Amino acid sequence: MKRRLPLILILAILAVLVIALFLPRPLLKPNSDYEVLIVRYNPTYDAQPTDIPTFDSDAIVACLRNYKAENAFTTTPPSSSYTDILLEITVRQKVDQGDDWKTFWLGKTNYVYFGKFMYRIPDGDALQNELLQVLDLPSAD
């Protein structure tokens, strides 16, 4: 029995690490209120995105809540150039909820940056299309 206890502890620690590193996580924390600060649209994939001045923050947040992200194991995106980004959205928790900021880059590659790491959005194309509908913007073809 004494020999099994260390093995069980090691396996439990490994299981927790695997879950923490590989399990998809929600894009936004549950039970937290978020607000959208910035929406930028870049339909021509050039270096000059357009700020969208009016948008329905609650609808965007509701849309983002339906998706998850996977750890990309990197601190920098494959490209931070606007030539790969169709939509850039920055959200934060409302002031009394905490200090959680996230920036979403959707386009040719789909990532969210929060904390110190990048996370890949596996259903990024679906999220991008849904957000374009919420924002009443045409898709970039």
Image (cartoon, rainbow, N blue to C red):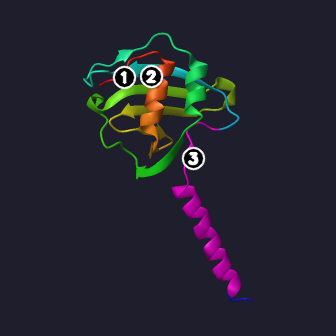
The residue nearer to you, when weighing 53 against 75, is 53
Residue bearing the label numbered 2 = 132
Estimate the spatial distance between the alpha carbons at disc 2 and disc 1, rounded to whole Å: 7 Å
Which residues fall within the magenta stretch? 4-29
Image quarter (top left, top right, bottom left or bottom right) of the N terminus? bottom right
10 Å crowding of disc 3: few (<14), some (14-19), many (20+)? some
Local SS, label 3: strand
127 in relation to 21, above or below = above
- Spot occupied by residue 16 in the image (x, y as percentages of width and height): 61, 63
- Spot occupied by residue 10 in the image (x, y as percentages of width and height): 61, 75
137 in relation to 33, above or below = above
10 Å crowding of disc 2: few (<14), some (14-19), many (20+)? some
Local SS, label 1: loop
Looking at the image, is mark 3 or mark 2 earlier in the sequence? 3
Estimate the spatial distance between the alpha carbons at disc 3 and disc 1, rounded to whole Å: 27 Å
CB contact under 8 Å: marks 3 and 1: no
Residue bearing the label numbered 3 = 25
What residue type is disc 3 on? Answer: Arg
Estimate the spatial distance between the alpha carbons at disc 3 and disc 2, rounded to whole Å: 23 Å
- Spot occupied by residue 139 in the image (x, y as percentages of width and height): 36, 22
126 in relation to 13, above or below = above
Residue depicted at x 60% and y 34%:
65
Image quarter (top left, top right, bottom left or bottom right) of the C terminus? top left
What residue type is disc 1 on? Answer: Ser
Residue depicted at x 56% and y 15%:
56
Residue bearing the label numbered 1 = 139
CB contact under 8 Å: marks 2 and 1: yes
Membership of 90 in magenta stretch: no
